Image (cartoon, coloured by chain):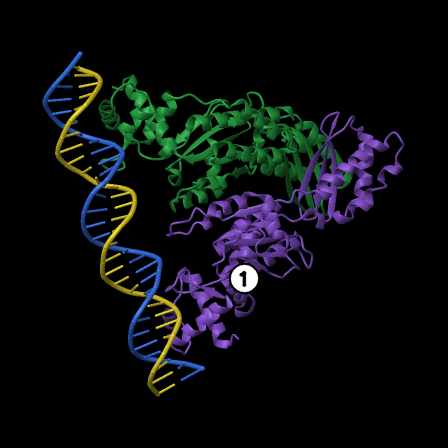
Chain colours: A purple, B green, C blue, D yellow
Amino acid sequence: MLDERKLAVLRAIVEDYVQTEEPVGSKALVDRHNLGVSSATVRNDMAALEEEGYIAQPHTSAGRIPTDKGYRLFVDKLTTIKPMSAAERRAISTFLEGAVDLDDVVNRTVRLLAQLTRQVAVVQYPTLTRSTVRHVELVILSTTRLLIILITNTGRVEQRVVDMAKVPDDTLLGDIRARLNSAVVGAKLSEARDLVKDLSKAYAPEEQPIVETIVKTFLETLVEHPDERVAVAGTANLIPVGHEVHASIRPVLEALEEQVVLLKLLGEATAPARLTVRIGHENPYAELSSASVVTTSYGPGDETLANLGVVGPTRMDYPGTMGAVRAVARYLSRILAGQ
Amino acid sequence: MLDERKLAVLRAIVEDYVQTEEPVGSKALVDRHNLGVSSATVRNDMAALEEEGYIAQPHTSAGRIPTDKGYRLFVDKLTTIKPMSAAERRAISTFLEGAVDLDDVVNRTVRLLAQLTRQVAVVQYPTLTRSTVRHVELVILSTTRLLIILITNTGRVEQRVVDMAKVPDDTLLGDIRARLNSAVVGAKLSEARDLVKDLSKAYAPEEQPIVETIVKTFLETLVEHPDERVAVAGTANLIPVGHEVHASIRPVLEALEEQVVLLKLLGEATAPARLTVRIGHENPYAELSSASVVTTSYGPGDETLANLGVVGPTRMDYPGTMGAVRAVARYLSRILAGQ
DNA sequence: ACTGGCACTCGGGTTCGGGGAGTGCCAATG
DNA sequence: CATTGGCACTCCCCGAACCCGAGTGCCAGT
């Protein structure tokens, strides 16, 4: 049904529309691309493409714009991811090298991605459950309050206060600390439950409840319900430069402030090194039905620590955006592996 | 020059303009407020007010809108801070009570403030230098890397990795940890420098450089250069609901993503329990010359930990916004004191 | 199968002209 | 002297009418 030339026409339409932001007509198309045929022929092809639902007219006697389905075909078949230029690669590298700690790495990454793509960037902090334990610290805050601190191999520090009837004395606490550490250090957080479940057995009966409280809080709050944080940058890019702007970006801004929404957007990324592109209505949220999301995962080696991505209008530069997302994810992975 | 009635006219103009968002004329004014005089009289008063620079006309034969100077007079003399209703107070209270840790407190606060004022809210994390030390922890990461963790009385945890030629063994480290803690626990961070400067003297000559490295990093990165973080919420409120919107909010959005700008905006707040209002051009940034900022500081008791505030258009509901900012700061202070 | 030609459509920009809200000024008035 | 009613004037806003041009669909010709 769709021969080679019709696909070329679709590709040209997408490319022109992304650049000019205006419906593209048959005449303009043959002028800008050397398709080797006349505008009348292109018109026939366009009619066929519209018939199949790949393009649409905003109104009669206007040019065509791609539909979500058209973008989908474009992304799947008609283009290749654009690699970063040498200058861009150098910029990414030097910009990320300077980071001093994990927070800084994530912040720099999200700003960088926003700048490269000129869109809204979203980066999830490395997920706890996939990282391993480096150290657990117990600190007495008062006679009834204990602070548990967890340090992971990604440099992340999680904290949690426990209220208890009576905090154990230094000796006992030191013992608990030692046993807890020898049990879980080096292990993945997801394995922690099995490793500590018998920990209290080693203690005298009257001490067991205390130990169990600590272990329980440790597991519940630090391991199983890590508040998965995300960083956002480039929201100003939602507002086009010269242009007037719809009020329709309000719901988008609202959605971008909701951690839950962001996590869901990022959350369904697939295997590492694969890019996920969700176009328009393919998004899980109606507010983002005129937006596209490009995500991927990152992490040292083949391990997947978390996800990152970009949110922009369906009319976006897919090859460039995909290239930037992939490149940033790779560099971020490398940085994390080095730490 | 400005008698009682002229001030009443100015007040009425501000109130009406804030509500309707449209230039207000003499006729509409006498209809909505019972000033007891005719529109002709009001016109004369308006001419006087314009002469003095408190109001202006967008163009001839249009109504008047307040100037920055007009808002300034309104805020200083013509109105009182609007207290929160009982229902609002209850909402604030219950919403903030539920927080589980410091991050949560700040996040809830900033969202609450954005919701109450329907504007952009900014909350600074409690500043380190004004809080006191609760515990210092030293953790061995590898043979050459040491992690310093600082816990403050506000529940904040700061971390920093130190690269060193050789990390001290457990015994020595335990000793350093004990001395460091006994030196600084309970002290303000601003006093820490004096308290630890002679710490290395107690050690053997060959151990002194190691201790000094740790102390130096501790001071430099944790005490003197805390990265002062801020939380922002409600950026979607920059976009009015029904209305079309200028592209002029782009620089505002950009500014709101810059930590430095936000800190500067918040940074110059005065004594606790005092509200600072900066109107239009009074702001230190040209990008925000059509915005007003209402800030105050917070902290348990009379202590000032950090600042919070609201950014909105110069045409904002000052009494209501000021009331909300004051109320939220008070509740936040109370929460922090309780912890 | 492609192309040139042609009639047709429709959105966007421009022009034009009332209607209306608002102003400034002035003479009259308590 | 402050206040008021009246009046002429000024613009902005809005809708109607209009034209222009880009774009389309179709068809006959190569």
At 36% from the left and 20% from the top, the residue drawn is B77
Camera-side residue of A177 and B64: B64
Q: Chain of mark 1?
A: A
* SS at badge 1: helix
- The quadrant the C terminus of chain B occupies is top right
Q: Is residue A186 above or below residue A314?
A: above
Pinpoint residue A108: horizontal percent, then vertical percent: 55, 49
Any part of residue B201 in sight:
no
Q: Is residue B294 above or below residue C29?
A: below
Camera-side residue of A15 and B125: A15
Q: How busy is the neighbourhood of tag 1: few (under 14 within 10 Å), some, or many (20 plus)?
A: some
Circle count: 1
Any part of residue B265 in sight:
yes
> Picture quarter containing residue A41?
bottom left
Pinpoint residue A87: horizontal percent, then vertical percent: 49, 61
Q: Is residue A54 above or below residue A3?
A: above
Camera-side residue of A93 and B41: B41
Find disc 1 in the rendering and name its residue. Answer: A323
- The quadrant the N terminus of chain B occupies is top left
At 45% from the left and 45% from the top, the residue drawn is B254
Q: Is residue B132 above or below residue A15?
A: above
Left or right of B233? Residue A168 is right
At 73% from the left and 45% from the top, the residue drawn is A134
